[in-house]
Amino acid sequence: MTLTEKTDLVRRSFAAYMTAARADIEAILHPDFTFTSPYDDHVDRDDYFARCWPNAGSFEHLQIQQLSPGDDGCFVLYEGRSKRGGSFRNTEYFRFEDGLIRSVEVFFGLEPGGTPAVPPPR
C-alpha cells in the first residue's frame, strides 16, 4: 500500500466513526481486524462492534492533528470533544493488510492543558 492509501483509510475510518456510518467502516476493516485500547486487549471485529462502536456518532468533532504513515502502519494524533462536553487528545496506530485496516491500537490522553481526574479522598 502507498502512504496515500494508508492515510486515506485512516481518514475514512474517522469519518465513519464521526457519523456512525457502520457500513462505511465495515467496508474498510479486515475480516481479522483487532482493536486494542487501555480497556480492550486485541478484541476481534465482532467484539469491537459490540463494545466500541456504540460510541460512534457521539462527538462534536474529531480533528486529526497529524498523520504519520510508514512502512508498517500509520500513527494518527487527534483531538476530540464529545457531545457530553469532555475533551481529549489521543494517538492511534493503524496496521494494514490486503488494502484494509488490519488493527488499531488506541492510546488515550487529555486535551492539551487538561487536568487529570483526581481520585476521591479515602
Image (cartoon, grey):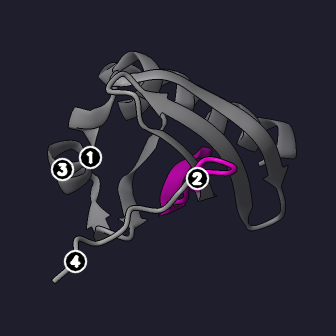
- Judging by the rendered image, the residue that carries numbered circle 1 is 52
Q: Amino acid at mark 1?
A: Cys
Secondary structure state at the residue bearing disc 2:
strand
Does label 3 or label 2 sit earlier along the sequence?
3
Answer whether labels 3 and 2 touch (C-beta < 8 Å): no
Instruction: Say left or right for 33 vs 7.
Output: left
Q: Amino acid at mark 2?
A: Asn
Tell me if mark 3 has few (under 14), some (14-19) or many (20+) residues whose alpha carbon lies within 10 angstroms of its own. Answer: few
Tell me if mark 1 has few (under 14), some (14-19) or many (20+) residues whose alpha carbon lies within 10 angstroms of its own. Answer: some
Q: Above or below — where is 55 with respect to 70? A: above
Report the mark closest to the observer, 4 or 1: 4
Tell me if mark 2 has few (under 14), some (14-19) or many (20+) residues whose alpha carbon lies within 10 angstroms of its own. Answer: some
- Residue 51 is tagged as 3
Does label 2 or label 1 sit earlier along the sequence?
1
Tell me if mark 4 has few (under 14), some (14-19) or many (20+) residues whose alpha carbon lies within 10 angstroms of its own. Answer: few
- Judging by the rendered image, the residue that carries numbered circle 2 is 90
